[in-house]
Image (cartoon, rainbow, N blue to C red):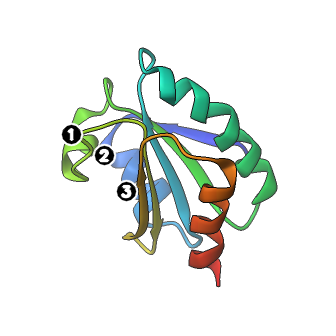
Amino acid sequence: MGITQISDAKSWEVDVINSDIPVFVDFWAEWCGPCRMVGPVVEELANDYDGKVKFVKVNVDEANELASKYNVFSIPTLILLNKGEIVSQQVGAASKESYKNMIDRALA
């Protein structure tokens, strides 16, 4: 399924808010070192949870209105939403295990 790039409110509504499965959102930017470290981990998770969780990336430089709406002040910020509601959030880079725990709790 891969990772969907979202840069506008309409795509956000369709791909995240109206998703029938949980959505793991990576708020990031090109210039952010920790974001570049998290990127490959998010790609691995997207493969691990293919079909169970949707993965999207939001570049805060292109979609700052979405970042503002979700109070993203530091990046990377990773948010897990289910039926449009935030169920878990992690600010800053963390281990793959940490993200897996976040997702597994939401799927339980």
Question: How far is the residue under mark 1 from the one under mark 3?
Answer: 13 Å
The residue pinned by badge 3 equals: 13
Residue shown at 42% from the left, 37% from the top: 76
The residue pinned by badge 2 equals: 9
Rendered position, 24 above or below 2? below
Question: How far is the residue under mark 1 from the one under mark 2?
Answer: 8 Å
Mark sitting on residue 65: 1
Give whichever of 44, 66 is nearer the camera.
44
Residue shown at 65% from the left, 63% from the top: 53
Dot 3, crowdedness within 10 Å: few (<14), some or many (≥20)?
few
Secondary structure beneath dot 1 equals: helix
Residue 18, percent across and down? 45, 67
Question: Looking at the picture, which amino acid does disc 2 mark?
Answer: Ala
Dot 1, crowdedness within 10 Å: few (<14), some or many (≥20)?
some
Relative to 32, is 44 on the left or the right?
A: right
Rendered position, 36 above or below 58? above
Residue 56: image quadrant is top right
Question: Looking at the picture, which amino acid does disc 1 mark?
Answer: Glu
Circles 1, 2 touching at the beta carbon (< 8 Å): yes
Circles 3, 2 touching at the beta carbon (< 8 Å): yes
- The quadrant the C terminus occupies is bottom right
